[in-house]
Amino acid sequence: MITRLSHLFLRTLRDDPADAEVPSHKLLVRAGYVRRVAPGVYSWLPLGLRVLRNIEGVVRDEMNAIGGQEISLPALLPREPYETTKRWTEYGDALFTLKDRKDVDMLLGPTHEEMFALTVKGEYNSYKDLPVVLYQIQTKYRDEERPRAGILRGREFVMKDSYSFDLDEGGLKDAYHAHREAYQRIFSRLGVSYVIVAATSGAMGGSASEEFLADSPVGEDTYVRCLESGYAANVEAVVTPAPAPIPLEGLPEAVVYETPEAPTIATLVDWANSADLGWTVTAADTLKNVMVKTRLPGGEWELLGIGIPGDREVDEKRLEASLEPAEVALLDDADFTANPFLVKGYIGPRGLQANGVRFLVDPRVGTGTRWITGADAHGRHVVDLVAGRDFTPDGTIEAAEVRDGDPSPDGRGTLVSARGIEIGHIFQLGYKYTDAFEVDVLGENGKPVRLIQGSYGVGVSRLVAVIAEQWHDEKGLRWPKGVSPFDVHLVIANRDDTAWSGAEELAAALDAQGLEVLLDDRKASPGVKFKDSELLGVSTVVVVGRGWADGVVELRDRITGESREVPVADAAAVIAAAARAR
Ligand code: ATP
Ligand code: MG
């Protein structure tokens, strides 16, 4: 196809949109790829839609290659299935819900585990039908708290979601690994640089869930990796190595001290070092007791105390991930008034537990470790409070921040952190949904077999932004071949009639080779046309310009910036070879 810029539904903008912070958002709007309709809701204009479709094509190709079968479920869904799995409430405020004219609750699907489990239940009933992988490339809805960076975090977005159903765990593992490899091929074909990180602690057996994170300084996900061992994990998934228990015999007695001016960790450390305890105290020797309240969906708020070494802060995301599906909030003044045993600045484990407050500790607070901490009375701290002797926590919690230099959970080096954008997620779900809907088939021995499910997502529309983010330069967008909205952007930069008709002929010859050609046939100055070609970012640019009189055209690679002259006689063949995706 030849698309003429003179007719293309496109307006490029000179200025960055006022609400844009990250480069991909600025450029996709300026270059006329997308337009904002509401927060986190965007229209796709011709160029953007072409890129989106190209990405979809690669994803579809690789899903078909692992035997996935494409179907399409509605986005508008009934409440009941989500009620059955409790996600109607557990999904929280991010769920877009609505009522129909009969006042019946409905929702706009944020992800479709329920519906795929029900679909398989509806069609299949024998072990002979399994295994099966079904997928869709479909619009999803999530009322994100912070829609961000244009299409990077939308409230309406396109996801490829697939679901595997197997007779046993071995089958699930095979489907999981097939997806893992398909995702590696997808992201490498799309030219995305990424890492695979463990998304859950691995308590369920190694790689129950992994995320694909695109490297990007504007990413919202922080992950850590160990350069020595290759370990990589989402910060939420990092498991703190616990120290071996220390024998309690012979440990010094806990002693309460008057510490009138020490309500903070820093002042407490100063006090401890002036009190001549016989050793040099650092913040890591103190136990900081952070108070929060948690609430299960539909439940009441409950107090929770969290004990972490005083040199660390609570990481909100890790805390939330550890407590899910319960929500968590800080205490307000009313909570302190209602619970007078909470003495701000002097809260200690014993006072909390004596008042029935659940108390969880960082894994470093192991049996036999000694702490300086609050003594539950104003102006008092206790020294040598020993875990497992003077107090017994109700369990451990991964809530403390992970820092560069922390030991890697695999014991083979230290951690360093980096930022990324989640582009894919693969998950060995297990029986959660098939149990909820009793998705059984008749087994080989005539007995019912419950199916085991996997779920796998790719952020298709997000990838448009991710690729723009990773590939752009200061002049504009730059698309890798195969993603680019056109194969060739042919710029006519010569007023001469023969050059004009020569360019038309060249465009026709490229079209005949099966290439998608964007022909800049506008009556604008060469300068304007070049600037636009840089902004739009088509991977291969051809200029019919001054050289035409000498029998050459210019072939530019938008990605490497290289340019060379090609004789008009072989131009079509040379350009086609250069522009082809593979
Ligand atoms: P995030 O942590 O970024 O909110 P998620 O873990 O909630 O993502 P999943 O439920 O795993 O996302 O969805 C599968 C994929 O869909 C994600 O890996 C991501 O690429 C994409 N995705 C999720 N939410 C959005 C969104 N609001 N806008 C665009 N793409 C999204
Ligand atoms: Mg995810």
Image (cartoon, rainbow, N blue to C red):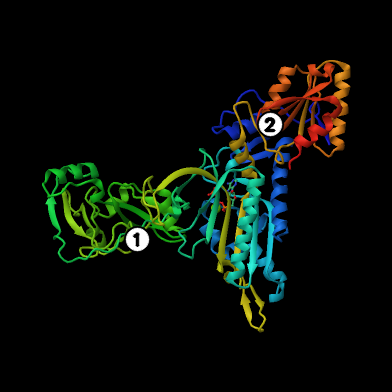
In the displayed structure image, the side of residue 59 where residue 153 appears, left or right: left
Label 1 environment density (alpha carbons within 10 Å; few <14, some 14–19, many ≥20): some
Q: Is residue 53 left or right of residue 199?
A: right
Q: Which picture quadrant has residue 3?
A: top right
- Return the mark for residue 537: 2
Residue 382 horizontal/vertical position (percent): 17, 54
| Residue under the image location 20 percent in, 63 percent down | 390
Whether the residue carrying mark 1 lies under 8 Å from ligand 2 is answered with no
Q: Amino acid at mark 2?
A: Gly
Residue 74: x and y in percent read 70, 56
Kind of residue at badge 1: Thr
Q: Which residue is mark 1?
A: 396
Instruction: Return the mark for residue 382.
Output: none
Q: Residues within 10 Å of mark 2 (few under 14, many from 20)?
A: many
Q: Where's residue 345, x and y in %?
A: 23, 47
- Circle 2 — which element? loop
Q: Residue at x 81, y 24 (%)?
A: 521
- Viewer-proximal residue among 510 and 294: 510
